[in-house]
Amino acid sequence: MMDVSQLISFDRINAAIPNAAVVERRLSHLRGVFADPHAYAGALEQGDPLVYSVASVEPAGGEGDLHYGIGKIMPGRVGQEYFLTRGHFHQWRPAAEIYIGLTGSGVMLLEHEQTRRAYSVDLLPDSVVYVPGHTAHRTVNVGDAPLTYLGIYPARAGHDYGALEERNFAQVVVVQDGRPVVLDREHFLASLPILR
């Protein structure tokens, strides 16, 4: 029989888990993450909105334990680029992760560390995205409502944000003709006006 403390209900709309640690990332926390630095500076002049939050449950225990968190990315854009998470590798590179879409409409950017193969996968309600080990992953909200999702990962996975600080992801998700499009970062940067 399951211990009652192991049964936890979560709020899929508000991305809340009772008694969970919550991390919030505002626009000012995401310097260098968005592709267009001029658009980022202009957006920051307009305010410092909440871009995303993650409520995490990380039980203390053995190496085989699982951690999980529920994320919520607000709708919005910086220039042409949709609101997104910082993205990360796992510190323990072999760690895989499962994302389960709860509400909203999103895209996950995935990039293998050794091969640099970059690709994207839709993250929609009642869908599952498998993130293999050695793969950087970033979640993007491409809709007009909050995107919420549940992530499940090994307890020893950890988060490595530093590996992406200089090179960032090879792809970006931007709006074109009112729709989300995944583009090569360098191609997108080359298309931006030189003078502002």
Image (cartoon, rainbow, N blue to C red):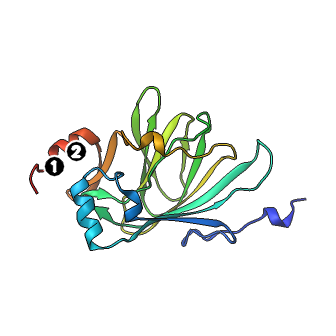
Q: Is residue 79 visible?
A: no
Secondary structure found at label 1: loop
Q: Quadrant of the N terminus?
A: bottom right
**Dot 2: few (<14), some (14–19), or many (≥20) neighbours within 10 Å?**
some
Amino acid type of the residue tagged 2 in the rendering = Phe
Q: Position of residue 97 (x, y in %)?
A: 59, 44
Q: Is residue 192 visible?
A: yes
The residue wearing badge 2 is: 188
As drawn, the label of residue 174 is none
Answer whether labels 2 and 1 touch (C-beta < 8 Å). Answer: yes
Relative to 165, is 77 above or below? below
Q: Residue at x 56, y 36 (%)?
A: 132
Q: Nearer the viewer, residue 47 or 51?
A: 47
The residue wearing badge 1 is: 192
Amino acid type of the residue tagged 1 in the rendering = Leu
Q: Position of residue 151 (x, y in %)?
A: 59, 53
